Image (cartoon, rainbow, N blue to C red):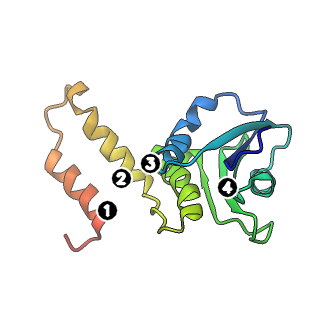
Amino acid sequence: MNNNPTINVYYSNEIKDWSLYTSLLWGIEEEGLPYQCVSKELNNAVKLAYDAAESSRLSVGIGIDNTGDIILHYQKLDKNKPLFKINIDEGHINLRNLGANSARLIKGIPFKTFKDKNVEEKFENLLDIEKSNEEDIDIEKIVTEVVEKLCGEGV
């Protein structure tokens, strides 16, 4: 393992498809900070994240277990009280935001907020709309719902 200042990402060696987590790494990259990923025999996201934070010169670690739980931890926090917890099922936007937040913690800038998964699904559906043969899709309704979810109900 290198001793460079990095955000450490420790993940269970029981994870079968690491490609599901690439959005997490993109979030770190877009904030311009280095990271390193290390497979571990442990399968507890909180413990993985805390161990990753302890071994990081930046004091920030991410842990991922085989249930899809993803934890962002900071070394100065109580071991059992991580900063953020999400699950892979919460979508790519949230994974990317968690990765970005790990870097923002170090930079001392405001965190990105996590999005409602339903908003992401509707947005993805909009992107795939040309694949659909249905004539009765109400695009205006979908866009209105997405905007209301993002901005609040008063739109």
Residue most extreme to the front = 4
Q: Nearer the viewer, residue 84 or 35?
A: 35
Three-letter amino acid code of the residue under disc 3: Ile
Check if mark 2's residue and mark 3's residue have beta carbons within 8 Å: no
Q: Which numbered tag is attached to residue 71? A: 4
Residue at numbered disc 2:
119
Label located before the other in sequence (4 or 3): 4
Disc 2 element: helix
For marks 2 and 4, give the CA distance: 22 Å
Q: Nearer the viewer, residue 55 or 115?
A: 55
Q: Position of residue 50 (x, y in %)?
A: 78, 58
For marks 4 and 3, give the CA distance: 15 Å
For marks 2 and 3, give the CA distance: 10 Å
Three-letter amino acid code of the residue under disc 2: Val
Q: Closer to the observer: label 2 or label 3?
A: 3
Check the image and report above or below for 91 versus 129. Answer: below
The N terminus: image quadrant = top right
Q: Closer to the observer: label 4 or label 1?
A: 4
Left or right: 155 in relation to 37: left
Residue at numbered disc 3:
93
Left or right: 31 in relation to 143: right
Q: Residue at x 57, y 34 (%)?
A: 20
Disc 3 element: helix
Check if mark 1's residue and mark 3's residue have beta carbons within 8 Å: no
Label located before the other in sequence (1 or 3): 3
Check if mark 1's residue and mark 2's residue have beta carbons within 8 Å: yes
Check if mark 4's residue and mark 3's residue have beta carbons within 8 Å: no
Q: Closer to the observer: label 2 or label 4?
A: 4
Disc 4 element: strand
Q: Residue at x 50, y 41 (%)?
A: 26
For marks 4 and 1, give the CA distance: 24 Å
Label located before the other in sequence (2 or 4): 4
